[in-house]
Amino acid sequence: MSELNPTASVAYESVTDDYLAKRQLKKGAAGWILLASLGVSYVISGDFAGWNFGLAQGGFGGMLIATLLMAVMYTAMVLTLAELSASLPTAGGGYSFARRAMGPWGGYLTGTAILLEYAIAPAAIAIFIGGYTNELFGWNGPTVYAVFYAVFVGLHLWGAGEALKIMMVITGLAVAALLVFIFGMLPHFSVDNLFNIEVSSAAAGASAFLPEGYIGIWAAIPFAMWLFLAVEGVPLAAEEAGDPARDMPKGIITAMLILLVVGGAVLLLAPGGAGAEAMKDHGAPLVGALQAVYGENSSAATFVNLVGLAGLIASFFSIIYAYSRQVFALSRAGYLPRFLSVTSKNKVPAMALIVPGVLGFLLSLTGEGDLMITMAVFGATISYALMTLSHIILRAKEPKLARPYKTPGGVLTSGVAFVLAILAFASTFVVSQEAALWSAVFYAVMLAYFAFYSRHHLVAKAPEEEFEAIARAERELS
């Protein structure tokens, strides 16, 4: 039986009493330190590979300006999400914030955009893992991608607490590799190396600083985002946090501070030591930079290659966690097929791990890491705009909402993030119209599914829907 909700043009279906009992995550699996580690691990692969393609798009100057803009955007957004995740702690993350602020359509638009980002990002990382294993062992291609997907989806099936602890160890190894890289490259830094890319004669505003002109700044934005992309996934762990009101803000802000430091160091030292020209299309830029200054078989390069693989694995591992929780939340509420949210005896959403994993593996077979980055950024920027807009709306619409943590600067901070997210979204069309088109097709298919089917079959008992029902009742009473 369906019950229409006239204010949102959706209908709710009755479910059995044990519906939610079959869809439970493990409470208390993560404290703030583990959440901070999760935030770093989501992103840390971006320090090891992918960001450097921005040098080809805009040279060092274009990449530097793009990175500064994106650092502002992500910092503002993280401060915004710290408030929202403490106020509305559910596994839906950004989807649940937008659901509260803008109704079912807003929630689904946001959740689908996040899903697009998190389903595709592991495919890009798998391709970069292949680049590192090729440097180490001569192994690359579909078999490598398949093995990594199978092993790390399997570890998540073991249990959330166990998986997050393994992830924390892997992230620690990756940070150690970054520190070796930083201290190894510092003595070899030269400003001249940053500007050795040939200047385009056809680009407006072209110079040694901006070899591709002003348009290069725009084109470098998706790759600058790769230094921070997915840190916003920390709120997806809210239902597994011990004390979300305290742990979520502390965890996500700590993660962002760490990422700002290491991202800046990598951006300066890799091209500053080995030259921007050599780094702009290298499959393993940190290893390549160390090889350029210490030799092909140097111990530093070998160490960073071997242990640096942990950085790619950490992000691969943690974003698998993120996509599974986003799928879980959307499925539990009926936005996606409900079988995807059923949890195992270990309190793990098995099908939410496996199904997107299979799709991601198929995407990795393209071997187009830079294309996958742009597609992931397409989804990410839509979600950023909608999440920060949700903060602005909720500040106006629900001023009395309990906010254990408040964003410094309030809606001015979220407004800055919103404007920069729109700018970043537009940049995907500059870099690759093909990537933007394929992303738009995926997005359109998912929206059609909601419009024609799932919005008529939502589950009122899901936490995100119950939050809205309670809020609506309170508004009516007042």
Image (tube, grey):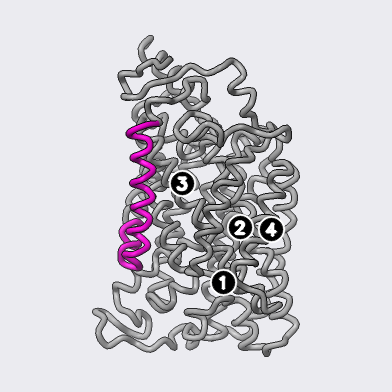
The amino acid type found where label 1 is placed reads Val
Whether 43 is drawn above or below 246: the answer is: below
Write down the residue under mark 4. 171
Write down the residue under mark 2. 315
Q: Distance between the residues labelled 1 and 3?
A: 26 Å
Whether 16 is drawn above or below 435: the answer is: above
Whether 426 is drawn above or below 28: the answer is: below
The structure residue drawn at horizontal position 43% and vertical position 14%, both measured from the top left corner, is 1
**Residue 43: x %, y % from top left:** 57, 58
**Residue 79: x %, y % from top left:** 49, 45
- Which badge, 1 or 3, is on the more N-terminal residue? 3
* Classed neighbour count for the residue bearing mark 2: other residues with Cα under 10 Å, few (<14), some (14–19), many (≥20): many
Write down the residue under mark 3. 114
Q: Nearer the viewer, residue 269 or 46?
A: 46
SS at mark 2 in the image? helix
- Which badge, 4 or 2, is on the more N-terminal residue? 4
Kindly report which numbered mark, 1 or 4, lies closer to the viewer in this rendering: 4
Q: Which label number is shown at residue 266?
A: 1
Quadrant placement of the C terminus: top left
Q: Give the range drawn in magenta.
A: 425-453
* Classed neighbour count for the residue bearing mark 4: other residues with Cα under 10 Å, few (<14), some (14–19), many (≥20): many
Where is residue 201, by image quadrant? bottom left
Where is residue 239, by image quadrant? top right
Q: Which label number is shown at residue 372?
A: none
Whether 394 is drawn above or below 135: the answer is: above
